[in-house]
Image (cartoon, helix red, strand yellow):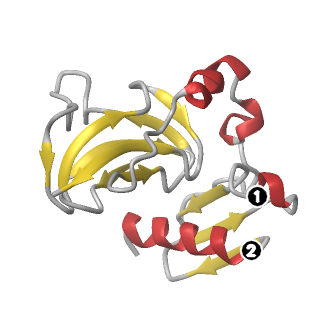
Amino acid sequence: MNIKDIQNLIKFVAKSGAQEVKLEMEDIKITIKTSSDVQFQEANLVQQIQTLPTAIPTAVPAAATPAAVPESAVAPQAATEVPEDDNLITIKSPIIGTFYRKSAPDKPVFVEVGDTVKEGDVLCVIEAMKLFNEIESEVSGTIVKILVDDASPVEFDQPLFVIQPS
């Protein structure tokens, strides 16, 4: 199971309304929990990924929960407006984590406003529980707006990019 499969599983569980799903395979154990409060269901999505040979506690660290994110860190993103144009596509975060525009501090950013991207091009990475997940474009087009600052915390389903499809 690769990261893309795990991200798709998280999306599916969040949309299904299930409160908890556990999946155990040969060398991996995944537990996905959602809040029972419908209003905060997507915001409180928590993922736990463990490999069986390594003894990792099953408790989620307090820093990984949305409640631990300072109010000031979330406020600027709430103020960001997403254009209401019907032709624009919004790329949203599939997971909770930290948004990075480049793969390493000494590397160039993946995309800039005005760049043309193809379906499957990497737009950013989101670090969640020490795993760096590449977020790929779902469509071909031009980057119209980048909605999140580099190294900022992001929530599940938070808008990241606005793309004008080609």
- The amino acid type, in three-letter code, at marker 2 is Gly
Q: Earlier in the sequence, mark 1 or mark 2?
A: 2
Residue 54 vertical position relative to residue 82 in the rendered view, above or below: below
Residue 90 vertical position relative to residue 145 in the rendered view, above or below: below
Q: Position of residue 66 (x, y in %)?
A: 71, 39
Image side of residue 46 versus residue 40, left or right: left
Q: Position of residue 29 (x, y in %)?
A: 59, 71
Image side of residue 5 versus residue 50, left or right: left
Quadrant assignment, res 126: top left
Q: Secondary structure at mark 2?
A: loop
Depth check, front residue: 161 or 18: 161
Q: Position of residue 62 (x, y in %)?
A: 75, 37
Depth check, front residue: 26 or 66: 66
User: Quick one: label 2, few (<14), some, or many (20+) residues within 10 Å?
Assistant: some
Residue 116 vertical position relative to residue 10 in the rendered view, above or below: above
Which residue is farthest top? 72
Q: Secondary structure at mark 1?
A: loop
Quadrant assignment, res 118: bottom left
As drawn, the label of residue 103 is: none
Whether residue 92 appears in this view of the structure is yes
Image side of residue 147 versus residue 58, left or right: left
Depth check, front residue: 165 or 133: 165
Which residue lies at the image location 59% right of the left edge and 25% below the top edge?
79
Which residue is the site of mark 2? 17
Give the quadrant of the C terminus: bottom left
Which residue lies at the image location 67% right of the left edge and 17% below the top edge?
72
Depth check, front residue: 77 or 122: 77
Which residue lies at the image location 15% right of the left edge and 27% below the top edge?
108
* Labels 1 and 2 touching (C-beta < 8 A): yes
Residue 25 vertical position relative to residue 70 in the rendered view, above or below: below
Which residue is the site of mark 1? 41
